[in-house]
Image (tube, helix red, strand yellow):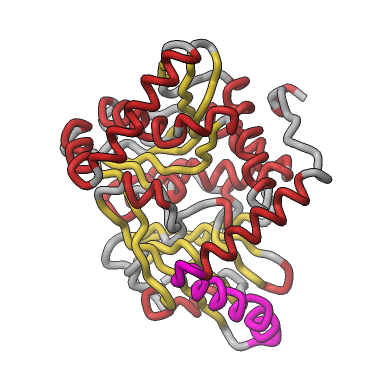
């Protein structure tokens, strides 16, 4: 087996085409964060991005995109920014994960959103749990019947609030695959405010992430595209979402809404419209990502399994990294698994975020960074 490590921009057309061929052949890899297009975009914006091209008998059998940080510490491509990691390889592919790390000049790598059950990494999985999906394989009407049957009161309430929003603020309309860059920045501003209000890390405090989202918004092909969707009341945007899709799967990434319209439940309303238009466009599922949120529990009609894993080779770096990360990771898992602890932690984060947001500048990018 031969492993060659390259920067994404060094991949040739044969490798790019082979990547797409491998991904299309495996349903488990049907996620835009595993697409070569996403890796190429990350490579243009981050000089730490590398790809291990894996050959067996002269045939490329897999690709492993990753980031190499100081002292040989590896991170999955995109790290906490994305919700799917793994090796893009043929179903029968398997190799020793530590040998893969050696070839990549990595001492250790941690995964929070690993495709579960990959033969190379499955021996190192420490936690496997379901990620909710909206299954649209039988069409939107069949999907709605499932969620309505599971919780008729919730469905009735959301539709009532939508009609009320229309009466009080203007006709409700939905924009699918919007090309409006101004609408995109409105959504990012809402999301930035949400991060700060709730005490989370504000992704959009980093300019390269804004540039990445803009590049993804401009991406358009049958197998990979950015999808911006917005709900309007009259001419006023009230809720939206930006995500990525393959030919069959849309992955949730940045949902947000204008808090002035919170009494109308615009986020849930938006997701129902999103599901309807996604189904009409031929998509089979919406992956909402791992995480316990009430709206996900209500909207889901299926699950995908996602794993946490840690692969390490003996080294001083590994020991230091373990001390800094693993105990915190275990604490986080314990909090997430206990509803009482999770609610208490969430309240604490929100209180912290509200206090801190008064001191921090808001997201102010109203013009495309591509024009600066």
Q: Is residue 172 above or below residue 51?
A: above
Quarter of the rendering containing residue 316:
bottom right
The residue segment tinted magenta is 315-340
Residue drawn at the location 63% of the way across and 81% of the way down: 322
- Where residue 162 sits in the image (x, y, percent)? 38, 24
Relative depth, front residue between 85 and 142:
142
Q: Is residue 330 magenta?
A: yes
Question: Which residue appears farthest toward the right when viewing the image?
Answer: 359
In this rendering, position of residue 73 left or right of residue 261: right
Relative depth, front residue between 193 and 275:
193
Q: Is residue 83 above or below residue 32?
A: below
- Where residue 35 sits in the image (x, y, percent)? 43, 46
Q: Is residue 89 above or below residue 125?
A: above
Residue drawn at the location 67% of the way across and 39% of the way down: 193
- Where residue 32 sits in the image (x, y, percent)? 42, 44
Can the viewer see residue 63?
yes
Residue drawn at the location 42% of the way across and 13% of the way down: 167
Residue drawn at the location 61% of the way across and 39% of the way down: 191
Q: In which quadrant of the rendered image does the C terminus lie?
A: top right
Prevailing SS of the magenta stretch? helix
Q: Is residue 341 magenta?
A: no
Relative depth, front residue between 253 and 34:
253
Q: How many marks?
A: 0
Q: In which quadrant of the rendered image does the N terminus lie?
A: bottom left
In this rendering, position of residue 364 left or right of residue 27: right
């Amino acid at each position: 087996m031969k492993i060659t490590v390259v920067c994404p921009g060094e991949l040739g057309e044969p490798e790019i085409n082979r990547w797409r061929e491998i991904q299309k052949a495996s349903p488990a890899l049907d996620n835009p964060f595993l697409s070569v297009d996403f890796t190429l975009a990350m490579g243009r914006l981050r000089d730490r991005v590398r790809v291990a091209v894996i050959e067996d008998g002269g045939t490329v059998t897999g690709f492993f995109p990753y980031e190499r940080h100081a002292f040989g510490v590896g991170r999955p491509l995109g790290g906490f920014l994305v919700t799917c990691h793994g090796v893009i390889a043929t179903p029968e592919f398997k190799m020793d994960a530590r040998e893969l790390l050696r070839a990549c000049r990595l001492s250790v790598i941690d995964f929070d959103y690993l495709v579960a059950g990959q033969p190379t990494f499955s021996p190192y999985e420490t936690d496997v749990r379901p990620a909710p999906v909206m299954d649209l394989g039988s069409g939107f009407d069949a999907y709605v019947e499932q969620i309505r049957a599971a919780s008729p009161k919730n469905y009735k309430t959301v539709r009532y609030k939508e009609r009320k929003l229309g009466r009080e603020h203007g006709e409700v309309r939905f924009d699918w695959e919007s090309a409006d860059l101004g609408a995109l920045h409105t959504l990012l501003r809402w999301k930035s405010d949400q991060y700060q209000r709730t005490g989370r890390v504000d992704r959009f405090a980093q300019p390269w992430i804004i540039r990445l989202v803009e590049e993804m918004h401009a991406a358009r092909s049958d197998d990979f595209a950015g999808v911006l969707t917005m709900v309007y009341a009259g001419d006023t945007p009230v809720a939206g979402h930006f995500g990525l899709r393959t030919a069959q799967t849309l992955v949730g990434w940045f949902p947000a809404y204008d808090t002035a319209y919170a009494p109308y439940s615009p986020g849930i309303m938006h997701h129902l419209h999103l599901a309807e238009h996604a189904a009409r466009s031929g998509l089979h599922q919406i992956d909402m990502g791992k995480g316990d949120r009430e709206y996900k529990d209500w909207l889901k009609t299926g699950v995908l399994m996602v794993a946490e894993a840690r692969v390490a080779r003996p080294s001083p770096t590994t020991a230091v990294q373990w001390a800094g990360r693993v105990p915190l990771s275990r604490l986080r898992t314990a909090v997430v698994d206990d509803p009482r602890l999770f609610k208490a932690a969430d309240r604490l984060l929100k209180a912290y975020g509200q206090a801190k947001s008064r001191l921090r500048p808001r997201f102010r990018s109203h013009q495309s960074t591509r024009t600066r």
